[in-house]
Image (spheres, rainbow, N blue to C red):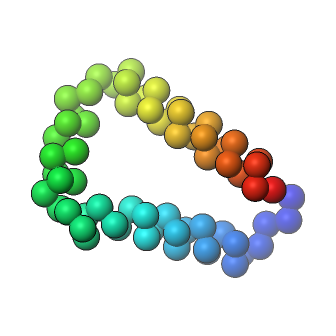
Amino acid sequence: MDLRWNDLLNAVALLLIMEGLMPFLSPSRLKQAYAQLLELPDKTLRSIGLVSVIAGILLLFLTD
């Protein structure tokens, strides 16, 4: 696999943009979302995380 530093930096830049949108656009809704996350059981959060990881891996393979 040929990984270029430029590709990695672009991916990190896109991640930062996506992560920064919610606090920039609606900080109060972000706080509400975090409060709701605190109420979820650990098993549910792990399942959400696993689905996200699998979706990301699939996207990587589909775009390669």
6 and 51: which is toward the camera:
51
64 and 3: which is toward the camera:
64
Query: Going by the image, does 16 lie left or right of 39?
Result: right
10 and 62: which is toward the camera:
62
Query: Going by the image, does 38 lie left or right of 64?
Result: left
Task: Tell me if residue 58 comes above or below residue 31 in the rendering.
Answer: above
Q: Position of residue 33 (x, y in %)?
A: 22, 45
Tally of numbered discs: 0
Residue positioned 24% across, 68% down in the render: 25
Q: Residue furthest bottom?
A: 6
Residue positioned 71% across, 51% down in the render: 60
Quadrant in which residue 42 is drawn: top left
Query: Going by the image, does 61 lie left or right of 46?
Result: right
Residue positioned 81% across, 56% down in the render: 64
Q: Residue furthest right?
A: 1
Q: Position of residue 39 (x, y in %)?
A: 20, 29
Q: Position of residue 62 (x, y in %)?
A: 76, 49
Query: Going by the image, does 39 lie left or right of 49?
Result: left
Residue positioned 86% across, 58% down in the render: 1
Q: Position of residue 23 (x, y in %)?
A: 25, 64
